[in-house]
Image (cartoon, rainbow, N blue to C red):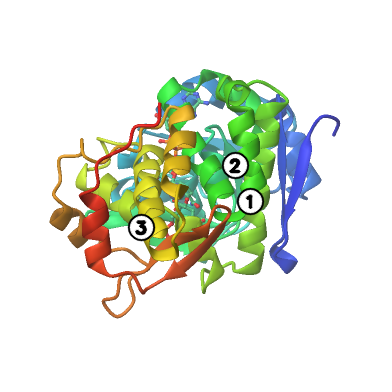
Amino acid sequence: MEGVKTLTVELGERSYPIWIGQGLLSSVARYLQEIGISHNQTLLVVTDEHVGSLYLAPVVQSLQEAGFRVFSYTVPAGEQAKSLACYEKIMTYALEHKLDRQSVIVALGGGVVGDLAGFVASTFMRGIPFIQLPTTLLAHDSSVGGKVAINHPLGKNMIGAFHQPLAVIYDTATLATLPAREVASGFAEVLKHGFIWDETFVQWLQDNAEACRRLQEPFLAEALYRACQVKSQVVSQDEKENGLRAILNFGHTFGHAFEALGHYQRLTHGEAVAIGMVLAAHVSEVVYQQRGLAERVTRVLSTYGLSGEWHTLPWSFEEVLQKMYSDKKVIAGRLRLVLLERMGKAVLTDHVDVEILRAVWSLPFQSQV
Ligand SMILES: NC(=O)c1ccc[n+]([C@@H]2O[C@H](COP(=O)([O-])OP(=O)(O)OC[C@H]3O[C@@H](n4cnc5c(N)ncnc54)[C@H](O)[C@@H]3O)[C@@H](O)[C@H]2O)c1
Ligand SMILES: O=C(O)C(=O)C[C@@H](O)[C@H](O)[C@H](O)COP(=O)(O)O
Ligand SMILES: [Zn+2]
């Protein structure tokens, strides 16, 4: 597969490939055959309205021409689709169309479709295989690692499972149709992978920001490859988040609170995480005496079009804090936060005094434009 970057998520018998390259969707059938999917297995492609209108027909056509029996289901675009109602509708569709325990769910879309379709796969007849076909920049993160979930009115990703895909087939040509806001949002998670694990990657992203933001090759594929590499290394060491994997939640304790308080409409996931990372970087500066850390995090985020400003949010510190206590990392009523010991090295800690968070919330925002 010339020109295709390949990684393996090492998880023993559940290991799987990540293929990254231009135009992979047109030969998606070949990739499915490569991982041993046979024509006896019915495929259900799940997508959303935006992605479906652009990419569903060619994907279904390529699969049907290769002899696969294919059904498809399209959900409304947006975070609201990560709901019990949508989950139930897909389940009903799958049952009505006689999918069985060998059938395969194919998630064609961004993180919303991947999380939702993956959760359907994890529970349909107690679990069937699924494939990720990510179409957003952000989905370099969501398509890898097997966290699948829907939201509950009381919190983000509260109903879910760990269910690894059989493969991630990442056609970077699809990113050309992404709205600018979603491009910036996706870079929040790309940058996160550098902040938590690899200072040299942060520097590379700073040095090549213009080309990356314009989605210019070979920079785009390299950025996604390196971010997926960080994610797969972490997941390989701690698949079910017993420890290390929690560092992938950098910026998310604040971020998920912002998303939920905004009813998943005010901020995208990446925007919420970006603000959360700036706040967590300020807390890290205090806890680990890392002067200049928050300034660097804010500056690089702003280079990628992400503001990181929290004072414009309409919620008080108390409202945000209360929401943070429903985070899945909270154990025995104790808040746990991911901080940066230094740039490129994240840690999970439960030793953060709420007064430090309150003091950070009161800091003036330092715009780094
Ligand atoms: N499972 C995980 O590990 C993990 C990791 C990170 C994020 N997530 C989840 O991912 C979700 C966010 O994902 P997202 O940012 O991809 O959002 P998304 O799936 O809602 O996609 C963003 C928007 O872009 C549209 N879109 C997608 N691909 C497109 C394309 N190629 N061209 C044009 N439009 C396109 C979508 O229809 C949607 O309107 C959140 O729910 C978040 O919690 C999960
Ligand atoms: O894969 C992980 O682990 C992550 O934390 C990746 C995050 O970017 C992602 O948003 C994830 O869905 C958060 O999971 P949650 O368990 O905190 O809901
Ligand atoms: Zn995330």
- x, y (%) of residue 217? 70, 23
Residues under labels 1 and 3: Cα distance? 20 Å
Label 3 sits on what residue type? Val
Which residue position holds label 2? Answer: 202
The image quarter in which residue 240 lies: bottom right
Looking at the rendered image, the quarter that the C terminus falls into is top left
Q: Is residue 369 left or right of residue 83?
A: right
Label 1 sits on what residue type? Asp
Dot in front, 1 or 3: 3
User: Badge 1 local density, few (<14 within 10 Å), some, or many (20+)?
Assistant: some
Label 2 sits on what residue type? Val
Pick the front one: 65 or 22: 22
User: Badge 2 local density, few (<14 within 10 Å), some, or many (20+)?
Assistant: many
Residues under labels 1 and 2: Cα distance? 7 Å
The image quarter in which residue 284 lies: bottom left
Q: Are marks 1 and 2 in contact (CB under 8 Å)?
A: yes
Pick the front one: 81 or 272: 272
Q: Earlier in the sequence, mark 1 or mark 3?
A: 1
Q: Is residue 159 left or right of residue 146?
A: left
The image quarter in which residue 45 lies: top right
Pick the front one: 30 or 97: 30
Q: Is residue 64 visible?
A: no
Which residue position holds label 3? Answer: 283
Q: Is residue 73 above or below residue 214?
A: below
- x, y (%) of residue 362? 20, 49
Looking at the rendered image, the quarter that the N terminus falls into is top right
**Residue at 77% from the left image edge and 49% from the top image edge:** 35
Which residue position holds label 1? Answer: 198
- x, y (%) of residue 54? 52, 20
Q: Is residue 98 left or right of residue 283?
A: right
User: Badge 3 local density, few (<14 within 10 Å), some, or many (20+)?
Assistant: many
**Residue at 65% from the left image edge and 43% from the top image edge:** 201
